[in-house]
Image (spheres, helix red, strand yellow):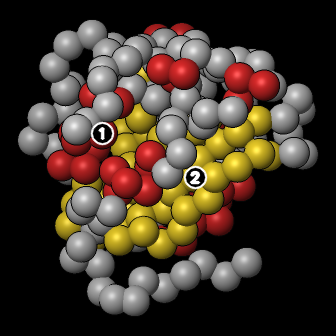
Amino acid sequence: MPPSPVRSSPPPHPPATQVSAWIERFAPLVASDARVLDLASGHGRHARYFAARGNRVVAVDRDESALAALAVDARIETRRVDLEGGAWPLPHEHFGAIVVTNYLHRPLFSFLLAALEGDGVLLYETFARGNEAFGRPSNPDFLLQKDELWRIAERRLTVVAFEQGVVADAKPGAVVQRLAAVGPDRPWPPVLPSG
């Protein structure tokens, strides 16, 4: 039975500017000519990163001021969208990679899987149960349950890497889940990034 719909929480900390080490580690799985969706892109750290790699990026967020700073890059298409306020805003669009960090809105999972090209890459990293011990987000509706990303991905994708647990070197600490997965049309075995 799919998890019940929930709304995402506001960011727990000031906007991050550094590329996530998880995203950077598995970015080599993304083809250089892939169209990348940066979902809930915020200030665009990952949109900028993939654009600098030569990818065409669609950055989607509800924060118009955050998107405005990205609009100057011709490789980044920005779309101001309320991801939680209506129908899936990207019908009939497909992406070679979908990147999601620090964002959770469970009703979007099926749309994300459907929007991923057959050999595409899903890179996801967000907070999980247990994070309430460290601060925000603390509402269980905004925290992944144990193994939740794995269970969602394994229905349609090949999981390349998955981890969950306490990130002790983060201040003030955090509990996260991270996933790197590829579509069923990706040749087996997928080539793992070095490092």
**Percent from the top left, x then y, of residue 123?**
48, 54
- How many marks do you count on the picture? 2
> Whole-percent x and y of residue 34?
34, 62
Q: CA distance from mark 1 to mark 2?
A: 15 Å
The amino acid pointed to by label 1 is Phe
Give me the residue at 35% from left, 71% from top.
158
Q: Amino acid at mark 2?
A: Arg
Q: Residues within 10 Å of mark 2 (few under 14, many from 20)?
A: many
Pick whichever, 132 or 30, lies toward us: 132
- Quadrant containing the N terminus is top left
Please determine whether, in this image, residue 30 is positioned above or below residue 128.
Answer: below
Label 2's element? Answer: strand
Depth check, front residue: 35 or 174 = 174
Circle 2 is placed at which residue position?
A: 178
> Residue 141 location in percent, x, y?
48, 20
Residue projecting furthest to the front? 1
Residue 80 relative to residue 165: left or right: left
Give the quadrant of the C terminus: bottom right
Crowding at mark 1 (Cα within 10 Å: few <14, some 14-19, many 20+): some
Element carrying mark 1: helix
- Horizontal side of 128 relative to 12 (left or right) equals left
Q: Earlier in the sequence, mark 1 or mark 2?
A: 1
Say above or below: 7 vs 171: above
Q: Residue drawn 71% across and 55% down?
A: 21
> Residue 74 sits in which quadrant?
top left
Residue picked out by circle 1: 109
Tell me if label 1 and label 2 are in contact, CB under 8 Å.
no
User: Measuring 55% from the left and 81% from the top, which residue is drawn there?
Assistant: 192
- Above or below residue 182? Residue 155 is above
Q: Does residue 132 show up? A: yes
